[in-house]
Image (tube, helix red, strand yellow):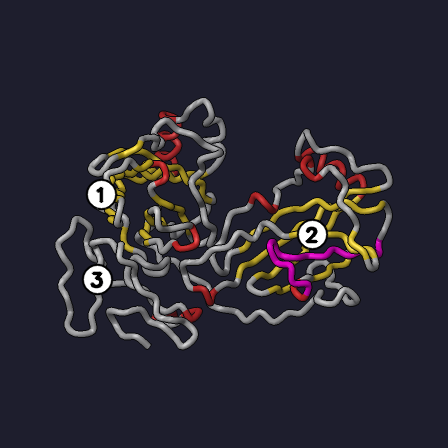
Amino acid sequence: MFTEGNLVATPDQPQQVIPANTPEILPSPTDIAPVEPKPTDVPVQTETSIPADLEQTNGAGLYEPGASRQNPLPLIPGQTTYEGSEWRISIDNVHRGSEATKYIKAHKTDRGSNCLDGTFVVVEYTLTNISSVEADKRADSAFFSHITGDKLSVHSPSVYNCTIDTKFDEGLFPGGTESGSIIYEVDEDERSLVLALDERTSELNSLELEPFFYAIDTDQFLQVPTYAPVTNDAGRDFKYPAKEGERIDVGDVSITFLRSIRGEDAAQRIAEANDSNKPAPEGTEYVLVEILMEYHGYKYGDRNSNNLGLPILKIRDGNKILPEPDIKDTRVPPNPLYLQEEVYPGGTIQGWEILNIPSGRTDLLIRYTQLFDSNESNSRYIAIP
């Protein structure tokens, strides 16, 4: 186990190193002698409220302040600054609740008609190009960010649902600065909000991000769930399919088919969900399936999230897979599963999928596989009532 000044690690968790673009607010770790942190506009977090029983939670261990959701740095508008290798990102202000609604009303564009249909957080940033390379860089692609909280969801910027006139849209040469705002939609009752932030450089892609975390709710500690072993083999053999309500485990994902609706009731709900939905082809009927999914990727540490909402569902009839009718692009279920957000370990999503089967059949199976997984041993089968 590593001691104070380093990350805590277990035999199952390799040592994780704070990247070279660590913000100035962090003191340099050392095993030789303590080093005083440099003066900064952001107060150094000298005390944390992390319970002792979380010291080795999930094999991830404690990180340096700011490097995990459990131990975020305080977000102080007007003072908090992240400095990477190419960008300096200053957080100027944070608007929540009625303040966020007021800000959006004042700045929304014609495309911003959906801006007031949810609960939002607006963060105002100032970006400065600090690269040593004499080239213009787009401010709107300078960094990745999202907000998370006690729901364990990943709330990415609401760029498609809500557009305001203070978005970033300029190219900046070294020394250039631009200010703008980003909108994040969160759950109405979500607490312990934390902002995750990391610059986007020419050498990084989305799989290599190591964000820093800043507490928006500085008076609330984010509880991260502990690891629960996943051992259920239900539905592995098509001869013994899982039933509705029975949890199925595949790798780091659990899936439960909560209920199904078929026939006229399903057809009516699907028609009401979207005007473009067409009736089921002759001789077939729709089946609406409500699905609950949970992510268990604790072994990957606190920097990992997963988009669970892309399961591959097929209908098995004896020894063959039934072809899908040519209507997939127009089938939009109520509260679609595929529109749910990414989640951190312990997080869940819940929504509906639409299937199409021969009318009246009760001897068919749903085959579930994960996206990009062609291993048949990871397929699971569920009986359709």
Which-is-in-front pick, marks 1 and 3? 1
Where is residue 38, by image quadrant?
A: bottom left
Disc marking residue 313: 2
Residue at the spot 34% in from the left edge and 29% down from the top edge: 166
Report the predominant secondary structure element of the magenta stretch. loop
Residue 363: percent from left, percent from top: 84, 56
Tag 2: residue type? Answer: Leu
- Per the image, the residue denoted by label 1 is 130
Q: Are marks 3 and 2 in contact (CB under 8 Å)?
A: no
- Residue 67 in view here: yes
Quadrant (top left, top right, bottom left, bottom right) of the C terminus: bottom right
Q: Which residues are magenta?
A: 362-376
Residue 238: percent from left, percent from top: 76, 64
Residue 96: percent from left, percent from top: 36, 39
Residue 237: percent from left, percent from top: 74, 67
Disc marking residue 46: 3
